[in-house]
Image (cartoon, rainbow, N blue to C red):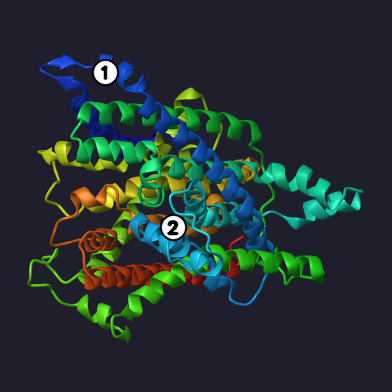
Amino acid sequence: MRLGLMAVPAVFFAVFFAYPVVSIVGRGLETGGGSRFGRIGEVLGRADIQGVLWFTTWQALASTVLTLLIALPGAYVFARYEFPGKKLLRAALTVPFVLPTVVVGTAFLALLGRGGLLDDLWGVRLDTTVWAILLAHVFFNYAVVVRTVGGLWSQLDPRQEEAARVLGAGRFTAWRKVILPALAPSVAAAALMVFLFTFTSFGVVQILGGPSYATLEVEIYRQTAQLLDLPTAAVLTMVQFAAVGGVLAVHAWTVRRRETALRLVDPAGTSRRPRGGRQWALLGAVLGTIALLLLVPLGVLAERSLSTSGGYGFDHYRALATIDEGGGVFLVPPLDAVGNSLRYALVATLIALVVGGLAAAALTRRAGRLVRGFDALLMLPLGVSAVTVGFGFLITLDKPPLDLRSSWILVPLAQALVGVPFVIRTMLPVLRAVDGRLREAAAVLGASPLRVWREVDLPLVRRALLIAAGFAFAVSLGEFGATVFIARPDHPTLPVAVARLLGRPGELNYGQAMALSTILMAVCAGALLLLERVRVRTTSAGEF
């Protein structure tokens, strides 16, 4: 049964991830019919490359710790408190996660750079410093922690903590002894995703770091696109691949040691309005953090989309519906990118849910090294250069029976590669928390494995499945690194269209880029708000 569930995810990753990545790396290491593995030591011995490796590692660790410290209170507030506008704010939290990194970098420059908000108010500039990079990473990944950890936290039975308090444990002791061990797998999963995204950070570092800072991803892009040095880029890709594999192995070992069965309840019954000054203060602090760190940059983008030389208006939005006949960058009106992105994202979400759901079901129970290695393999797309994946698609998927280079499905396939790990990491902690005796009882009563899944597992994980769908849809909307190489000129996605507009001078191009970014924010917020409404209906229908 387990091997059958693993078959589809294994084939998917072998064909659309392992094959393209291995092919592009192999091509970079071969020349004249011979192997160039001797280049590995030469590249890694360079002082500039060692500096890139060191900065990549420590900034990812710092970004992960800072994100957890800032976002865990938010996860608690959204899991346990009810307050006006909660659903809308929960949907808005995920919007930063889908924005193209170029746009976010520009927004943070407007806040932290020359002439930005801090410069105007206090004469402080943080651009070209590591603090700007760290704050932008928290901006991106805040929702990862809130939705991943908060999703499980809201389903934990609060009576377990109350029982510990009755037995004499203090508030902090009860949290440390009861809640923290239960949340450990979910926190570890969130930390893993944040680390992988910041370890492979590209646009944020390139724009905010200036010439002083570069991650492996930035250096791979520079070696590939600017210096045309494929051997060096291949070596760096292998280093990145090995580092990510090591992180995933450590993660699998630590999570396996913390796995436990939990009592899950309806999340609607675990949240309530804040009581007392301390709880209201915590809610105020979390809402203030969200406003300053997340909503202000988004507000800057919206303001710039409306700002024209003649004042505020919708000129940039109207221009999106036309084609620039004077040497423009699009074969179609830029507004067409909205429909393209929605169609691609929906297909990518469906693929990610099928592949990720099957993989999560296969990984539910403890297993040997083969299955644990399979778990780590499924997370590798988060840590492998999107530049490598994009180039790999172009050079491998161009011959029968996989001649897909001219097919529209290529873009959703690339986007689904990034969405699958989110589906797995969101669903797996909840699946593993289901008491195995429920499955055993259903099987003893004659239920088939499929019916056991439908009658026991699915009702408990339906909420996690919807959260996973939201993440997959969001990352598909905002995927840029691989899509920029494979999206057809007459079918651009929103991030690709934004990048093309930002790459051309002129006030109109910049304003159109900000307008498209604002549309992307609105589409994402609307989709996630709709998902929240569906989630509320399903949970209120008595599924738990």
Between 370 and 498, which is closer to the camera in this rendering? 498
Q: In the rendered view, does 506 fall on the left or right side of 257?
A: left
Q: Secondary structure at mark 2?
A: helix
Which amino acid does the dot numbered 2 rest on? Phe
Q: In the rendered view, does 370 fall on the left or right side of 494?
A: right
Between 515 and 111, which is closer to the camera in this rendering? 111
Task: Indicate the position of residue 96 as horizontal and vertical percent values.
Answer: 44, 61
Q: Earlier in the sequence, mark 2 or mark 1?
A: 1
Q: Residue at x 25, y 72 (%)?
A: 507
Which amino acid does the dot numbered 1 rest on? Arg
Q: Closer to the camera: disc 2 or disc 1?
A: 1
Residue 39 numbered mark, or none: 1
The quadrant where residue 319 appears: bottom left
Residue 387 numbered mark, or none: none
Q: Which quadrant, please, contains the N terminus?
A: top left
Q: Residue at x 57, y 56 (%)?
A: 146
Q: Residue at x 33, y 16 (%)?
A: 41
Q: Residue at x 20, y 31 (%)?
A: 229
Which residue of the protein is positioned furthest toward the right in this rendering? Answer: 168
The quadrant where residue 398 appears: top left
Which residue of the protein is positioned furthest toward the front in this rendering? Answer: 123
Task: Indicate the position of residue 528 as horizontal and vertical percent values.
Answer: 45, 67
The quadrant where residue 475 appears: bottom left
Residue 97 numbered mark, or none: 2
Q: Secondary structure at mark 1?
A: helix
Task: Indicate the position of residue 243 as horizontal and vertical percent values.
Answer: 43, 29
Where is 209 relative to 96, above or below?
above
Do the CB atoms of the residues marked 2 and 1 lie less than 8 Å apart? no
Task: Indicate the position of residue 480 as horizontal and vertical percent values.
Answer: 30, 53
Q: CA distance from mark 2 to mark 1?
A: 37 Å
Q: Is residue 384 visible?
A: no
Q: Label 2 neighbourhood size at 10 Å, few (<14), some (14-19), many (20+)?
A: many
